[in-house]
Every structure is written in C-alpha cells, then in structure tokens.
Image (spheres, rainbow, N blue to C red):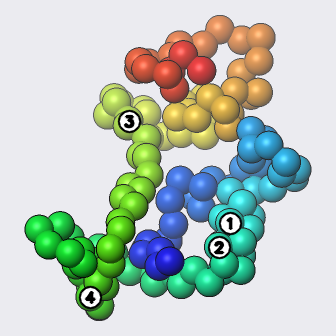
Amino acid sequence: PVVVAPPFGGQLMGKGVDVENYPGLLDMTGPGVVQLMQKQAKSFGTLFEEDSVVEVDLSSHPFVVRTNHSTINTHSLIIATGADSRWLGVPGEHKLRGGGVSTCATCDGFLFRDKPVVVVGGGDTARE
C-alpha cells in the first residue's frame, strides 16, 4: 500500500489537544495518534509519499495517480479527503477561536460543561 498525503497532515495534526474519544488510547495528542497509525501501517509494508495528488485517471486499469512529483499505477484506490471545519465568517470569529468559539464539540466540549452554548450547523456532528 502507498499513502499519499501532504506532510502537514490533517485535522488531528493541527490539534494540540488530547484525543479523548478514541477507544484504547490514553493521554494522546492528535500528532501522537497520527504517529501510532503511521507506525502500524509501516509494520504492514505501507509506503508514505509526502505529496499532494494533482490528478487521477480512472478511465482504464491500472488507475493512474499523479502527484506533484511522481506517477503511481494502481488497481485500487481509496480516496480519503478528510474533513475541514466550516467557519461562518462572522466578525470576531477568528479572534475568539480557542477562546469561546470552537468547531470540535468532542475536543472542546468539556470547556463548556454546565454552560449555555449555541450550536450552529446540522447533521450528525452538530447533534453529537
């Protein structure tokens, strides 16, 4: 297996907070969880290419995945684009990030325990 991902990582890499909602892991930060996952994947022979995919051709087999620096031919492809927080763009939002404005109830919910809060959004994540 080959994992193509930029070196700066996703949401877990950007959060320096403890990860408390992943079964079996205690006292872990986001980057620590990512390191453990990479270590496990490497133990099965996974190669990591720190790059970005710029094009995928699915019109024939093997599929062709082009990154900024290489071309990979493969018979199967898993697209895992991750998730990004969607901010509202309202005045003061950026200034108050981490100081009352949050996009992760699981990460920051304990900060607001027994306090009135407003949840903006919908779907499963907002309800959670």
- For the point 54% across and 16% down, which residue is it? 127
Residue assigned mark 1:
37
Which quarter of the image is occupied by the C terminus? top right
Q: Are marks 1 and 2 in contact (CB under 8 Å)?
A: yes
Q: Are marks 1 and 4 in contact (CB under 8 Å)?
A: no
The Cα atoms of the two marked residues, 3 and 1, are separated by 28 Å
Q: Are marks 2 and 4 in contact (CB under 8 Å)?
A: no
Which residue occupies the foreground of this view, 123 or 62? 62
> Residue 78 location in percent, x, y?
39, 61
Q: What amino acid does circle 1 point to?
A: Met
Residue assigned mark 3:
87
The Cα atoms of the two marked residues, 1 and 4, are separated by 25 Å
Q: What amino acid does circle 2 point to?
A: Ala
Q: Indicate the secondary structure of the residue bearing disc 1.
A: helix
Residue assigned mark 4:
71
The quadrant in which residue 50 appears is bottom left
**In the image, which disc is placed on residue 41?**
2
Which residue occupies the foreground of this view, 46 or 14? 46
